[in-house]
Image (cartoon, helix red, strand yellow):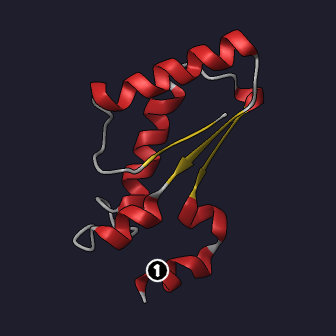
Amino acid sequence: MYTGRGPSADALHMGHCIPFIFTQWLQRVFDVPLVIQITDDEKYIYKPEIELDGPKGSIAMGRQNVKDILAFGFNPDKTFIFSDVEYIGHMYQNVIRV
């Protein structure tokens, strides 16, 4: 399965949580692998007022969101969570700034 999150706040609210609750249930019932993409690059590009890697930036918000997502109890052996900016590589931060 595949899902994701565009970080826009330090914490998830109920509207963000419902898809993750459902996805966790699907993973548990069907015993399937899951990929969760944190689209911090997209959030930075389309909301330029958000810093990229500052304390309130899209990368920092994404990290906070991952902590919340992990609390839903996904199977750690079958779950891969990645940040676009960090997974693509350090040079990518410079690319999206340009």
Residue 79: % across, % down: 69, 33
Q: Type of residue at label 1?
A: Ile
Furthest residue to the top? 29
* Residue 4 visible somewhere in the drawing: yes
Residue 73: % across, % down: 57, 19
Residue 59: % across, % down: 43, 59
- Residue occupying image coordinates x 41% and y 83%: 97
The number of numbered discs placed on residues in the rendered structure image is 1
- Residue occupying image coordinates x 52% and y 85%: 95
Q: Is residue 52 above or below residue 34?
A: below
Residue 53: % across, % down: 40, 68
Instruction: Give the residue number, with chain letter if any, for mark 1.
Output: 96
- Which secondary structure, mark 1? helix
Q: Is residue 97 above or below residue 59?
A: below
The image quadrant where one finds the C terminus is bottom left
Is 32 on the left-hand or right-hand side of 50? right
The image quadrant where one finds the N terminus is top right
Furthest residue to the left? 49
* Residue 51 visible somewhere in the drawing: no
Is 22 on the left-hand or right-hand side of 1? left
Please identify the quarter of the rendering in which residue 57 is found: bottom left
Is 76 on the left-hand or right-hand side of 91? right
| Crowding at mark 1 (Cα within 10 Å: few <14, some 14-19, many 20+) | few
- Residue occupying image coordinates x 62% and y 17%: 26
- Residue occupying image coordinates x 47% and y 19%: 21
